[in-house]
Image: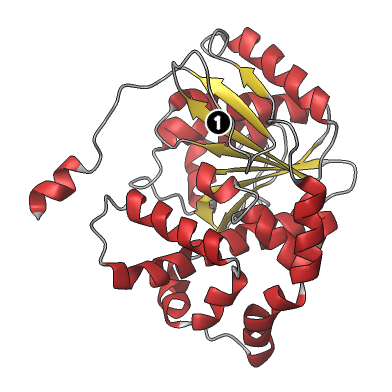
Amino acid sequence: MALNPARRRWLRHGAAATLAALARWAGATARTVPAPVDDARAVVADEQARLAWVHARLAAMGTPDWLLLGEQHDADAHQRLQAAAVQALARQGRLAALVLEMAERGADTAALTPDADEAAVRAALAWHEAGWPWRRYGPVVMAAVRAGVPVAGGNLPRRQHGEVIRDAAWDDTLTDTEQRAALHRALDEGHCGLLPAAQLPAMARIQLARDDAMAATLLERRAPGRTVLLVTGAQHARRDRGVPHHLARRAGAAAARACVSVELRATDAARVEPEPAFDALWLTPAIPPVDHCAGLRGRG
C-alpha cells in the first residue's frame, strides 16, 4: 500500500517539527537518579507470589495510559510476569487492552467472547507460531481474553516491509545521530554481525516503522482512567528511540510522559545497573546461555 503525499510529508518533516517538544520531553524525563530495580527472582516461579509481587508494583505506578513491558523473548519468566500484569490490571477493571508485538496491526480479538477457545484466538490474531511459540505467549493472551479485554496486534504488517525499506522518509523519524548510530549497532548485534553495513539503514527503517505502528495502535486504544498494556521486546520499549519516541512524534511530549516503560532482564548478577532508557527494571532468573549466532556463522 503506497503512502499518500500527506503521510509522506509527516514522516519526513514530523520529527523536525516536534524537535523542540521532544527536547522538552527529554529534559522533563531525564533521570537524576537511577531507575528503580525490583527483584522478582525469588517469587516468579510461584503463581500466587508472582501475582502479589506484580500487583504491588502496578499499584505503585498509578494508572498510566500505557504500560510497556520490554521482554527478552526467550525468557519464560518474562511472559509469566506479563500474564500476571494482565490478570492484576483486569481484576481491578484497569486494563483497557493488551497490545502485542507478536501479532500484526489490524488483527484483534474484538469479535470473540471470553469463552473463545485458543484456536479461535490464534486465528483472530493470525498467529505466527514459527516466530512466536504459542506455549510461551498463549497464557498472556488468554488471560486477557478470559477477562473480556481486547487483544490487538501492534506490529507492522509484513506486507509493508518492502515499501518501508524503500522509503527514506523513515530515516527522518529518528533525527538524533547518536541514537541512530546506537540503533544500527543494536541491529548489527541482533543479526550476529553478519549484515552488510549497507543494509543497516534499511533494517533501521523497518525497526522505526514497527515502533511507529505499535505507537499508533497504543494511541488508538487509549482509554482515560485505564491502562493499555504493550508486550514487546526490550529494544522496542526504550524511551530514547522505541515506541515512546513515536508516541511523542505522533501526539506530543505529554503522550510520552503518559507511559511507563519497564525493562525485564534475566540475570543472576548480585549487582545490576539499570538502563536509563527505561522507567524501571524488573529482574528475573538467568536463563541458560545460548549462542543463537553459532548456526548462522557456520553457514558462512
292 relative position to 115: left or right: left
Where residue 248 sits: x, y (%)? 74, 61
Q: Is residue 180 above or below residue 141?
A: below
Where residue 266 sits: x, y (%)? 46, 25
For mark 1, does the 10 Å Cα neighbourhood hold few (<14), some (14 to 19), or many (20 or more) residues?
many
Residue matched to label 1: 264
Where residue 122 sits: x, y (%)? 49, 45
Q: Is residue 87 above or below residue 24?
A: above
Amino acid identity at mark 1: Leu
User: Which quadrant of the structure image shows residue 58?
Assistant: top right
Q: Tally the marks.
A: 1
Residue drawn at x 56%, y 27% is 273
Q: Which of 39 and 179 is in front in this view?
A: 179
| Farthest right residue in view | 225
Residue 293 visible somewhere in the drawing: yes
Where residue 136 sits: x, y (%)? 44, 31
128 relative position to 238: left or right: left
Residue drawn at x 82%, y 34% is 94
97 relative position to 4: left or right: right
| Farthest front residue in view | 32
Q: Which of 282 and 162 is in front in this view?
A: 282
- Say what secondary structure mark 1 lies in: strand
> The C terminus is located in which quarter?
bottom left
Residue 106 visible somewhere in the drawing: no
Q: Is residue 254 above or below residue 203?
A: above
